[in-house]
Image (tube, rainbow, N blue to C red):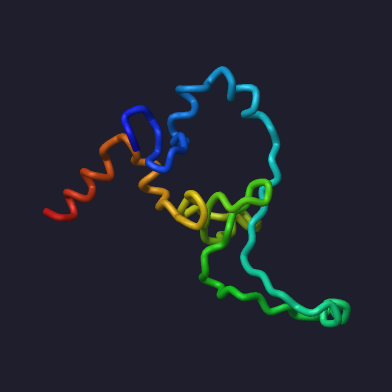
């Protein structure tokens, strides 16, 4: 990231948005957006889909321990692991989506600009 808050790819880093556009963004913060979690997918011929019924099992392309995708408005914004909270499914976010398919570790985003990530790395090397 450059000193002006610009990410190297030209995008403005999310952490800098409140400081730069606080008045413009504030009214948008209460918007409800559709959030969904995708933990697998499969393609099947229409004939097979028409045969689905009670008791049918659809095998997905992911394993139980694979990360799930968190989508906001149909776009992948994060990866995570499924968890159960008080009997309900939840997702523990483990990484945020970058541009395209790049993934950024959540710890790197949380520690960005604080120098904390650099200090942790130095401590590991010592």
Residue 47 location, quadrant: bottom right
Residue positioned 49% across, 49% down in the render: 99
With 3 as the anchor, is 26 left or right in this view?
Answer: right
With 33 as the anchor, is 94 left or right in this view?
Answer: left
Residue positioned 53% across, 52% down in the render: 78
With 64 as the anchor, is 117 left or right in this view?
Answer: left
In the depicted structure, whether residue 48 falls above or below residue 98? below
The answer to which of 49 and 4 lies nearer the viewer is 4
Residue positioned 62% across, 65% down in the render: 39
Kindly give the residue lying farthest to the top in the view shown. 23
Kindly give the residue lying farthest to the front in the view shown. 10
Query: Where's residue 103, x and y in %?
Result: 45, 55
Picture mark count: 0
Query: Where's residue 32, x and y in %?
Result: 70, 36
In the depicted structure, whether residue 47 falls above or below residue 11? below
Query: Where's residue 75, x and y in %?
Result: 62, 51
The answer to which of 9 and 113 lies nearer the viewer is 9
The answer to which of 62 and 83 lies nearer the viewer is 62
Residue positioned 52% across, 57% down in the render: 80
Kindly give the residue lying farthest to the left in the view shown. 126
Quarter of the image with the N terminus is top left
With 10 as the anchor, is 26 left or right in this view?
Answer: right
In the depicted structure, whether residue 118 falls above or below residue 55? above
In the depicted structure, whether residue 11 falls above or below residue 45? above
């Amino acid at each position: 990231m450059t000193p002006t808050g610009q990410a190297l790819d030209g995008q403005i880093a999310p952490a800098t948005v409140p400081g730069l556009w606080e008045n413009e963004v504030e009214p948008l913060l209460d918007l409800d957006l559709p959030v969904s979690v995708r933990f697998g997918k499969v393609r099947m011929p229409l004939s097979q889909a028409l045969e689905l019924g009670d008791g049918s099992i659809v095998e997905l392309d992911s394993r139980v321990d694979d990360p799930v995708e968190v989508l906001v408005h149909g776009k992948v914004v994060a990866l995570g692991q499924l968890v159960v909270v008080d009997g309900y499914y939840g997702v523990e976010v483990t990484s945020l989506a970058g541009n395209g398919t790049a993934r950024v570790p959540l710890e790197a985003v949380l520690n960005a600009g604080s120098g904390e990530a650099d200090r942790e790395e130095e401590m590991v090397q010592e």
